[in-house]
Amino acid sequence: MTAIDKIDREIIRALQDDFPLVAEPYKLLAEKIGISEDEFLRRVQNLAAEKKIRKMGAVLRHREVGFSSNVLCAWEVPPDKLDSIAAMMIESPAVSHCYDRQTAEDWNYNLYTMIHAKTRDECEKIVRELSEKTGIKNFTMLFSKREWKKTSMKYFPE
Amino acid sequence: MELTAFDKSLLNLLQSNLPICSHPFAEIASKLGTDESTVLDRIKTLKNEGFLRRIGTFFNSNALGYRGTLVALQVESNSIPKVAEVINNFPTATHNYEREGKFNLWFTLMTQDRAQEESILEEIRSIPGVDAMINLPSNKKYKINVQFQLQ
């Protein structure tokens, strides 16, 4: 694993803005930070190989493509079964995120899944199915009432 | 605007496979049996029509040295807009949702060290109307993959 140097940070800053929709996007970004396209591409490939980049591509707007409902479901899983239960949960294509989190006082949920579907009923059905499949009976469905903020993280601000 | 069969194939490919090379859109085009400029024009249209939230690079925050947490607050209902505004003003608070349940405001926070996280949380906890706060840092990420197969 190589350390992130000054040029990498400039590349990360350039890549986290809107990706240029032009024939040679990397050439354009490389010019902006004053390095060659070859070096820019080599470094981006390296960041991807080292898993510092987890994905290149598009994220769709859920609602516009028909997935209007989503729910954050928090599960209370025996700590020694977290890996095996999580493995069952993430098999479902409806689960986009699955994290193991610390608990808090009066809050014993330790596994969190974000579930997407076309309707609220469908979300609830998927949660019931996951509960049956995994045998986890203690869970809470945290449906959102209002989105106050949804942004992408800006790393290494100048 | 209704998505065509071509649009759905294009969006399915774009969600996972934008190649890291000099002409990424030409590679996508060859997989779809069309040309680079057709693909670029169509992506711009789909973006303008609001189908794309973002196109580009998604980083692994932990590998870049950031720590992420999910924080839940119990807020008096008439204070929610005010509290949400204070949270939203932190650039490192990336998502903020009002939710059903005992804890009614949930936000994610990304920081470069624990001290920064603690000072932000202390400030938010002290806003009038915030009755309780729980901090739920992640131990392990089993899946992050926001992808919708369009058929």
Image: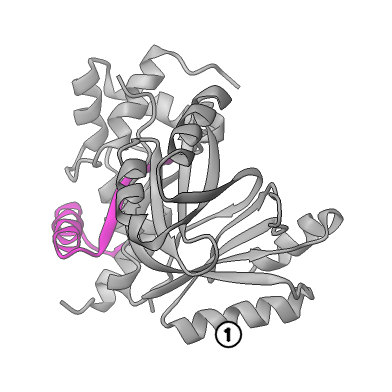
Near-viewer residue (B53 or A106): A106
Give the residue displayed 15% in from the left and 77% down from the top.
B1
Measured from the top left, where is residue A79 in percent x and y? 82, 54
Please tell me whether residue B48 belongs to the stretch shown in magenta: yes
- Circle 1 is placed at which residue position? A125
Residue A122 visible somewhere in the drawing: yes
Please tell me whether residue A3 belongs to the stretch shown in magenta: no
Near-viewer residue (B138 or B126): B126
Give the residue displayed 57% in from the left and 26% down from the top.
B114
Q: Secondary structure at mark 1?
A: helix
Give the residue displayed 69% in from the left and 49% down from the top.
A104
Q: From the viewer's perspective, is residue B99 above or below residue B35?
A: below
Measured from the top left, where is residue A76 in percent x and y? 74, 63
Q: From the viewer's perspective, is residue B87 above or below residue A78?
A: above
Q: How is the image coloured?
A: one colour
Tag 1 subunit: A
- What segment is highlighted magenta in the picture? B32-59
Q: Relative to residue A46, is residue A137 drawn left or right?
A: right
Give the residue displayed 74% in from the left and 78% down from the top.
A133
